[in-house]
Image (spheres, rainbow, N blue to C red):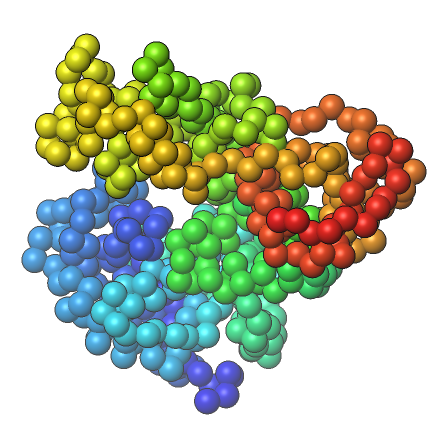
Amino acid sequence: MAVNLAPLAFVDIETTGSNAQRDRITEIAVITWDHQTLHRWERLIDPGVVIPEFIQSLTGISPDMLEGAPQFEDLAQELWQELEGKIFIAHNANFDYGFIKAAFKRLEMDFKAPVVCTVKLSRQLFPLQARHNLDSLVHAHRLSVQQRHRAMGDADVLWQFWQVCERHFGADVLEQSIVKQTRKASLPPHIDPAQIDAIPDAHGVYIFYGDEKLPLYIGKSNTLRTRVLSHFQGALTKSKEMKIALQVKHIDWVHTAGELGALILESQMIKDQLPSLNVKLRRSRELCAWTLLPDELGYRRAKMTSAEDLNVGQNDHLYGLFASQRMAKNALKSLCQKHSLCEGLMGLEKLGKGQPCFAHQLKKCQGACVGLESAERYNLRLITALSAMKVKTWPYPGPIGIKEGEGVHVVDHWFYMGFVKDPEDLEEHLGRQRPDFDLDIYKIIQSHLRKMPQDQLVLFSSSSEIESHPHSL
């Protein structure tokens, strides 16, 4: 069906919250215009979950109003018929479309429709208007509001706004706007397509900013532009992407020489800028590891070592770098249970003098706590069990370089010292004070060294000359 003949569906929903996967729809309204007649459809919906008090105050929809109302599954087919074959038009459309698509998906129904956002339409047609939220549209165009924050009331505002646009600009301009929005990935209202066009499809890091230029999300990719666009395509089905699409006001990016540079820069920028929607790669203030020390009877006991005493790269007796003491204790407890080691000797359980640990009473410890297992045998089993967690010492006599693009990444004892393009800058990088140890960058570098070709690794001698060095990891 040609775009200019397709019926238009002006849609608005009320929900229990902003997360399409967790929250549910409480009301939905659809106003259909087939270019001849107008049809209105609205339903209250039992969400099956608690409606927060502030949502009840905002919408006026209370649990009492929804008593006896159908659940979404009861009217899914009816709603499908209302929306099928129509252009889906909503304000901040990613939100409404995402919720409806998620609700259909829970019923194993794959709903798809061309989507038009009236926020973006307003920005395009009325660029001098300061704001483009629904209240601003009502004020700027003197629209009539029957019931704000109710589905039919807000859907009717969209229908009135569409009529204003058609009177001012004509049907042809509106058709072009529909084609423009439905032909490509649905960009957030505040994002100029020129911003996207300027991003290279190359290695690098991208930054999404919200209000006041505060960072929302930082990510890396080997194809920057494609990855950025994928966020907005996913905004219709994933709650995290929807949050990004609703809040992002500006996009920035940094080109890197390759994948390793992108991984390292992403980790550094997340720790420095603390974007609100990034959870992983945050700086750990509780970094710790286990060391083994013999007691007076020769049994090796685990001792917690904190960040300032780790001496990573030079200490040959570190086991398992952990982001917190809780994670360290849980990992050691799991290891004890798997290998029948003594939790008492490991410091996970208090031992009375001459008393067995609790696991020994359950026949899950071989008795090192009461001398039934020799120190030699117990220590051998312990070190064998911990071997997979052993932190590698630095395998080179000094700093190394990892070639990427037109420069090298300088690394010294698992500490990242920077990226060098000009050989004259090498001495400065090697002479810098080492930064704080970064567990994520340690993992990134270690993983890269294991899989990279031998000719990408170079050894820096004491005179800062570069020598070929065989790949030894």
Tell whether 104 sits left or right of 439: left
Measured as percent of width and height from the top left, residue 256 is found at 73, 51
Measured as percent of width and height from the top left, residue 188 is found at 54, 57
Measured as percent of width and height from the top left, residue 14 is found at 30, 54
Tell whether 348 sits left or right of 263: left
Classify residue 289 by image quadrant: top left
Measured as percent of width and height from the top left, residue 208 is found at 59, 47
> Is 185 located above or below residue 397 in the figure?
below
Tell whether 10 sits left or right of 151: right
Residue nearest the viewer, comparing 25 with 388: 388
Residue nearest the viewer, comparing 350 with 198: 350
Residue nearest the viewer, comparing 87 with 449: 449
> Is 431 located above or below residue 439 in the figure?
above
Regarding residue 28, the answer to whether it shows in the image is yes
Classify residue 216 by image quadrant: top right
> Is 39 located above or below residue 228 in the figure?
below
Tell me the residue at 85%/44% (across/down). 466
